Every structure is written in structure tokens, then in C-alpha cells.
Image (spheres, rainbow, N blue to C red):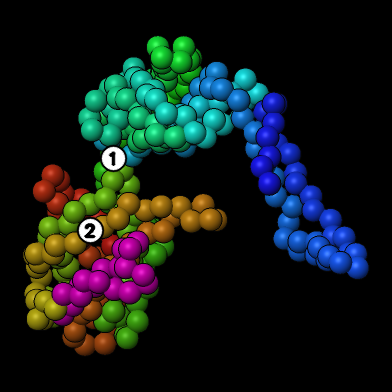
Amino acid sequence: MNLYSTASGNTTITADGIETSTAKTIQSQAPNPVVEFYSDASGLRISKSKSSVIADGVDYTVITVAIIDESENIVSNYSGTIDLTTGVGYFEGGNASTTLVFDEEGSKSINLYSEDISESATVTAEANDTDSGFTATAFTSVSFTQPETKNITFVEGSVLSTEQYGLIRFEIEVTGADVDLTSMLISWSETKALLDKIEIMSLSSSGTYFPIINTDSASSPHTETISTILYRSENDINNIPDNSFILLTFIGTPNIMKHETIYVTFYDNENSYPITVYVP
């Protein structure tokens, strides 16, 4: 059975069961289907996944353009093109303007990036279909904010020591961007303490330490080549940063690292990030 309409909008289809001596129709147990009717394209709707983007060329917002009729229902079988432009930033592919091609679709999405700062960048969607006469324009705005300076800081009060001060664990907070770690410099004053192992737990490590580097009873100062990523700290559902953990294993006499100060410098290909860790 075919269903038609001369008006756009939603309608609910209901089926009732009827039983006779010659035929039996059973009412469907599934939820009643809802059919959406739409008319010809008459406008555009443009939206973004978030209104504020860090201007670092990595963060982005998703721009979505939908074709709508006069009742703002999405025209799901539209075929044609929509031109997109942005006053600041660039779309996937690196250009400030692009064309979305619709092939019997109601909406299309594309990522928008920027490396320039702007309080309000206008993104414009424009339809100009000369064949059907469909013309429309829609706007939205996005702010591109200053990237936070990349840094590593020691989290005060995070030091835990076990095994008679042979195992020293502490937290670091990575801000601004991920750090592509290339090496670490570790120094301490107790000459009889030897560094035997370095272990790192960052956000993507699923609660395990990786990498684990054996330093083979190294004396102070010690530089270790390490190729891993220290991921930028992100806030959890309680708005508490998920930080990275560093676990250092020292060998020596009991309590050898008690009240020691450990100096750690993290290096990537751009900068160095020194921190100071006091073992209480």
C-alpha cells in the first residue's frame, strides 16, 4: 500500500487487529512507525559541533549543512551542491572554501580547523541551483582561541613511596598539547642510590605502565632516550585532570631516597620541561 501527502511534517501510522470468520489480522507489537513528509528544498540549516576551537591546526569543529523545506523538515533526497566559505581557518583539504556535493542526501558534514585566532569567524553556506531555482544562504560563527602553551608540571602532593623508599611514584600534568617525549634527564644527590628502572603511565596506556625502561643501576645524573607520547591531561567526569604517572625504581640501602630531591627534565624535539620532585 502506498502512502502520500500534500503537506510536510510527521505522521504516525497505526494498525489495529480485526478478526472475522474468514480472515484474521494481528495488531503489530512494534511501535507505531512515524513517517516524515517533506516538500521541496527552500532553505539551509548550518550547525557546528562546538563553538570554540583551539587555533592549533589540530583541534576542530564539525560543520553540518542540512537542506530543509519551508517547515524546516530535512529534505533527505536532495541532489546538488552547496558552497561553504569561512572567514578564518580552513576546511578539510586546507582551503577556506569548499563545495559539498549532495547525492540524494539531506545533510553533509566537514571539519573546520584554524591556526589563526579569531573571536568570531563567520562560516557561510550558500545554495545557488540554477536548474531548480533553489537559492538560500545560512550562517554560523566559530571562535578560534589561543593555544595553551605546552608544558609539563609536577602535581604537588602526588608523591608516593613504597618498598622502603625504593619506589618513587609521582604525577605530572601535561598542558597545551601532547609531548612527543625523546629523552629524560634525572638527577639526585644521594650518591649511593642507583636508578634501576623508569616506568611511564599516560592517558592511552589503559592503566598500565608503558614504556618500562631498565636503566641498569645508573648513577646520578642519568640521561635516558625514551620515545613515547605524554598525552595532554584531560578532565574526567568530576572535572579532575587525568594526569600521567612516573614510577622510578632506586636500589640501595633502606630509606635511601627518603627526604631526597629528584630533578627531572623531559625533552621533546622543541623544548625542555624541568620539574622538581621532593620525596617526603
Q: Is residue 197 above or below residue 84?
A: below
In the drawing, does residue 200 fall left or right of residue 145? left
The correct choice, above or below, for 217 with respect to 46 in the image is below
Question: Residue 20 at what x, y percent from top left?
Answer: 90, 64
- At 43% from the left and 55% from the top, the residue drawn is 241
Question: Is 164 left or right of 70, judged from the image as shown?
Answer: left
Spatial separation of the CA atoms under disc 2 and disc 1:
16 Å
**Residue on which the image places disc 1:** 58
Question: SS for tag 2?
Answer: strand
Quarter of the rendering containing residue 190: bottom left
Which amino acid is tagged 1?
Val
- Is residue 31 at all visible to an observer of this figure? yes
Position of 14 with respect to 205 (left or right) is right
Q: Eyeballing the image, is 280 above or below 147? A: below
Q: Earlier in the sequence, mark 2 or mark 1?
A: 1
User: Is residue 163 highlighted in magenta?
Assistant: no
Q: Position of residue 247 (x, y in %)?
A: 28, 72
Near-viewer residue (75 or 209): 75
Q: Nearer the viewer, mark 2 or mark 1?
A: 1
Which residue position holds label 2? Answer: 229
How many residues crowd around disc 2 within 10 Å: few (fewer than 14), some, or many (20 or more)?
some
Residue visible at 9% across and 64% down in the picture: 225
Residue 43 drawn above or below residue 267: above
The location of residue 12, given as percent across then percent down, is: 75, 44
Look at the image and give the residue range highlighted in magenta: 193-213
Instruction: Kindly identify the amino acid type of the residue bearing the numbered disc 2.
Output: Ile
The quadrant where residue 223 appears: bottom left
Residue 9 as seen in the image, left or right of residue 64: right
Of the 4 image quadrants, the one containing the C terminus is: bottom left
Q: Residues within 10 Å of mark 1 (few under 14, many from 20)?
A: few
